[in-house]
Image (cartoon, rainbow, N blue to C red):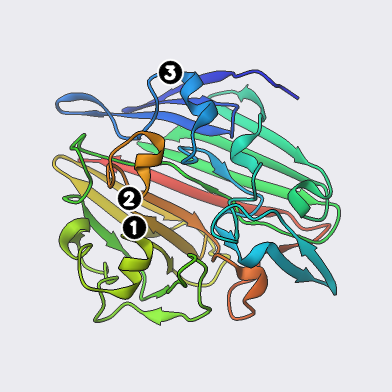
């Protein structure tokens, strides 16, 4: 296992990217535009800055991305206790989740492959989990392929926590967003989902038609007040999809980004607490493709259980264009 910081660069048609073994993270993504190369992800000026990053910037979040309520869940009659790391809940896998560990990385042709073995009992999760993340640049897109296996029943939710700003403006409130989702999961004050699946129609959460992120972010809405902006899970459909589906589109000035995924949800997070990482509030936006938060405690949500003999597979594609 590597315990020192390593980095790799990938280049593709109109794209170039830098990655770290710390958290298997995307450290930087540049897109070629008519005006030259533009950095579209938030990051730190030095690689060492990522080592103390409190915002999971570009990292792989796991074993369970997003929240598990009160740091507890039951599986096959066994009760498991996890470390709480955010307002009484287990967030992004606990105090030492996947984004705060060194992964083993190596080039595979034009791709970068990073692997991590999470032992049985790691942060309280059952089963030894073998996780692999493959990054590749193809056809104007950054593609992330996730696979995982386990030797005992467990729960799993993986995502990449990149922060995007397509224009380089001081904030992303003017970015135009489309999310192809008819419903979202409202949250309790701690950020935990209530268990309800609520239609977006007639609410400030309706991004089914292109809408500026800042158009309604200051509205008098209880959910926006609780999250201090958007920090909500949007329901795309029922996993697994046969192929990646278009889940969201982000546009700013002369650049657009399409997000395709096999996951059943996407978390919209408008960088409400970026000041903790030394950036400005709303300086960037996350579109985290994922399963629902707290699914192990919510029987009405799609299951995140992974069992021996099964292979977890997931793909997300970020495609850029004018």
Disc 3 target residue: 46
Q: Earlier in the sequence, mark 2 or mark 1?
A: 1
User: In the rendered view, would you say 293 is above or below 10?
Assistant: below
Residue 133, position as x, y percentages in the image: 61, 39
Residue 131, position as x, y percentages in the image: 70, 43
Q: Are marks 2 and 1 in contact (CB under 8 Å)?
A: yes
Distance between mark 2 and mark 3 Cα atoms: 28 Å
Distance between mark 1 and mark 3 Cα atoms: 30 Å
Residue 138, position as x, y percentages in the image: 43, 35
Q: Residue at x 50, y 40 (%)?
A: 56
Q: Secondary structure at mark 2?
A: strand
- Answer few, some or many: residues within 10 Å of disc 3's Cα (few below 14, many 20 plus, some between 14 and 19): few
* Residue 150 in view (yes/no): yes
Q: Earlier in the sequence, mark 1 or mark 3?
A: 3
- Answer few, some or many: residues within 10 Å of disc 2's Cα (few below 14, many 20 plus, some between 14 and 19): some
Q: Nearer the viewer, residue 101 or 114?
A: 101
User: In the rendered view, would you say 297 is above or below 211?
Assistant: below
Q: Secondary structure at mark 3?
A: loop
Mark 2 vs mark 3: give the one in front. 3
User: In the rendered view, would you say 296 is above or below 125?
Assistant: below
Q: Residue at x 78, y 46 (%)?
A: 122
Q: Nearer the viewer, residue 274 or 196?
A: 274
Disc 1 target residue: 248
Q: Quadrant of residue 223?
A: bottom left
In the picture, the disc for residue 258 is: 2
Quadrant including the C terminus: top left
Q: Earlier in the sequence, mark 2 or mark 3?
A: 3
Is residue 287 left or right of 66 when viewed as pictured?
A: left
């Amino acid at each position: 296992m590597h315990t020192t910081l390593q980095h790799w660069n990938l280049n593709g048609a109109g794209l170039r990217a830098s990655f770290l073994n710390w958290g298997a993270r995307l450290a930087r993504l540049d897109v070629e535009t008519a005006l030259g190369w533009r950095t579209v992800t938030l990051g730190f000026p030095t690689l060492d800055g990522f080592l103390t990053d409190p915002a999971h910037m570009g990292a792989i979040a796991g074993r369970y991305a997003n929240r598990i309520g009160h740091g507890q869940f039951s599986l096959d009659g066994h009760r498991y206790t996890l470390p709480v790391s955010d307002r009484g809940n287990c967030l992004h896998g606990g105090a030492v989740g996947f984004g705060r560990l060194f992964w083993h990385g190596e080039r595979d042709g034009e791709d970068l492959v990073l692997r991590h073995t999470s032992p049985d009992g790691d942060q309280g999760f059952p089963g030894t989990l073998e996780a692999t993340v493959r990054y590749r640049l193809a056809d104007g897109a950054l593609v992330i392929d996730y696979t995982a296996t386990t030797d005992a029943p467990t729960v799993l939710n993986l995502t990449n926590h990149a922060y995007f700003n397509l224009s380089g403006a001081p904030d992303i409130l003017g970015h135009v967003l489309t999310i192809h989702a008819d419903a979202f999961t409202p949250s309790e004050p701690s950020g935990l989902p209530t268990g309800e699946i609520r239609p977006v129609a007639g609410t400030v959460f309706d991004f089914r038609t292109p809408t500026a992120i800042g158009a309604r972010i200051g509205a008098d809405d209880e959910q926006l007040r609780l999250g201090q902006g958007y920090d909500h899970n949007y329901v795309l459909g029922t996993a697994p999809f046969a192929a990646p589906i278009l889940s969201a589109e982000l546009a700013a000035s002369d650049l657009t980004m399409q997000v395709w995924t096999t996951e059943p949800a996407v978390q919209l997070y408008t960088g409400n607490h970026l000041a903790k990482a030394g950036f400005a509030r709303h300086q960037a936006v996350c579109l985290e493709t994922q399963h629902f938060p707290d699914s192990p405690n919510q029987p009405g949500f799609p299951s995140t259980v992974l069992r021996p003999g099964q292979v977890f597979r997931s793909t997300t594609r970020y495609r850029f264009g004018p």
